[in-house]
Image (cartoon, rainbow, N blue to C red):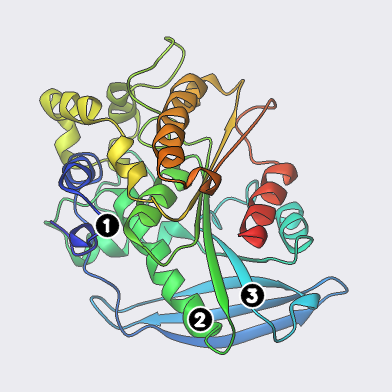
Amino acid sequence: MNDFARSPGVCDEARAYIQALYGDMPPAPQGVVTTLVHTLTSPTHLLEIWQVDLMEPLEMTWHLTLHQPLTSGDRGVAVLLSPDGCWPHVVNAAAMAAVTAQEVCLAHFDRLLFAHDRPDAQSGGAVHAHWPKRPFSALSAWAWGLLANAQALRQIQSDKAFKLGIMGHSRGGKAALLAGALAPDVALTVAHNTGCAGAASFQFNDGHSETLTALQAQFPHWLSPACKQAPVRAQIEALDNRALLECLTGRHLCVMQADDDLWANPQGTRHAVARLQSHWDALGLGAKLHHFTRDGGHAVTALDWSRAAQTLAQI
């Protein structure tokens, strides 16, 4: 089992679920070095592009983009980190404006450097190339990339009080849930329209939503290679995602779901949120679970970004 899943906040049931669905994760990133390579000040925010050099457990370099509201100054900062920098329809000017309007920073990176995103790319990208025989999934590699970038942001903001949230959309949101579950210093995890292998329970499906079998057939590289086996998929569905979500107990979780995004299983998502809400209410932690719904389909809207940033700002 990978280093992260050995953390005290991950129970045996969650470890079994993570291993079966997402596979292994690389050892914890070490020796992160950040270098500012570009700045640009606009009337509304400061753009910074940072080079991130990772030394261990593999050597790799990438760029991390950071948009900071001009009002942040030298006080404490809240940063919302997205792995979806490869998608301009997700991370764009509207996203930047919505987040910085809440006096929250938006950071993003290209997750495709860590693992490629093609059905025939089970071994594409830096993580697979370094460990060609390890049973990683793209989701576990992307989650690991989130955690490496979280380390970089802590170094960049080391002189300020720092509050970190991570937000992912669809497949990026599945990775964000995994990263959030394994990283106790992430204050807020935001899962946007994540569906199967994300925030949706496997126990509810109205026939219009993606199943684990369909996901494995269409996007096998997202999942552990073990998911090719029907008994493993049955085990995952029986375990369900409850234990994974419970790893976030004591921190903040924000689940966003479009009610008309049927493929992403809004019914299963409502069930998982209600089940978690009942437990967290009993622990006196119910206010840490945030559930936003809307109509309007699968895509991320400016309203979604604004709600996520506002949630992070208020915790």
Left/right placement of residue 232 relative to residue 119 reads left
Left/right placement of residue 165 relative to residue 100 reads left
- Where, by quadrant of the figure, is residue 44 drawn? bottom right
Residue under numbered circle 1: 9
Disc 3 and disc 1: Cα gap in Å? 26 Å
Label 1, residues with CA under 10 Å away: few <14, some 14-19, many ≥20 = some
The front one of 75 and 169 is: 75
Q: Of the two numbered discs 1 and 2 on the same chain, state the one appearing first in sequence.
A: 1
Residue under numbered circle 2: 51
Residue 148 image position (x, y, % from top left) = 38, 70
The front one of 11 and 142 is: 11
Amino acid type, residue under disc 3 in the picture: Val
The front one of 201 and 219 is: 201
Q: Marks 1 and 2: which is nearer the front?
A: 1
* Residue at figure coordinates x 56%, y 58% from the top left: 85
Q: Circle 3 — which element?
A: strand
Residue 297 image position (x, y, % from top left) = 64, 27
Q: Marks 3 and 2: which is nearer the front?
A: 3
Label 2, residues with CA under 10 Å away: few <14, some 14-19, many ≥20 = some
* Residue at figure coordinates x 53%, y 66% from the top left: 164
- Where, by quadrant of the figure, is residue 291 drawn? top right
Amino acid type, residue under disc 1 in the picture: Gly
Q: Of the two numbered discs 3 and 2 on the same chain, state the one appearing first in sequence.
A: 2
Q: Which numbered disc covers residue 77?
A: 3
The answer to whether the residue labelled 3 contacts the one labelled 2, judged by CB atoms less than 8 Å apart, is no
Q: Quadrant of the N terminus?
A: bottom left
Amino acid type, residue under disc 2 in the picture: Gln
